[in-house]
Amino acid sequence: MCMKQRIHRDKLMFHWITSHHEIVVGFKRVLYGTCTKCGKSIRAGDSLCDKCFRENKQVSKK
């Protein structure tokens, strides 16, 4: 039995694709920003870290 497969490379990400499975291995660049309240490093697009968000949420409920 012969299994068809494809290997696709996208910069540092490698995709092995067979008829029923896909395996993805590699490195992906993730951009980081800083929390506006404490300055902790967080993912880009967010303005508050989880801890500051929970604290801010508790204050706004009162």
Image (spheres, grey):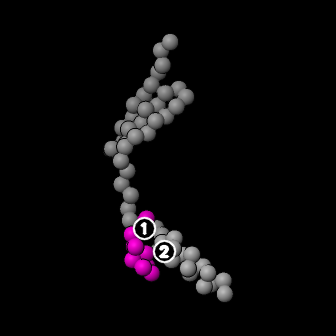
- Residue at which label 1 appears: 42
- Point 46% across, 31% down: residue: 17
Asked if the residue at tag 2 contacts the one at tag 1, i.e. Cβ–Cβ closer than 8 Å, the answer is: yes
Residue at the far left in the pictured view: 11
Residue 21 placement (x, y as % from top left): 52, 31
Crowd rating for badge 2 (residues with CA inside 10 Å; few <14, some 14–19, many 20+): many
Q: In this view, does 42 lie to the left or right of 19?
A: left
Q: In which quarter of the image is the C terminus?
A: bottom right
Q: Does the magenta stretch include residue 32?
A: no
- Point 48% across, 72% down: residue: 49
- Residue at which label 2 appears: 48
Mark before the other along the chain sequence, 1 or 2: 1
Give above or below for 12 relative to 55: above
- Point 40% across, 40% down: residue: 25
Give above or below for 12 relative to 18: below
Residue at the far bottom in the pictured view: 62
Residue at the far top in the pictured view: 1
Label 1: which secondary element: strand
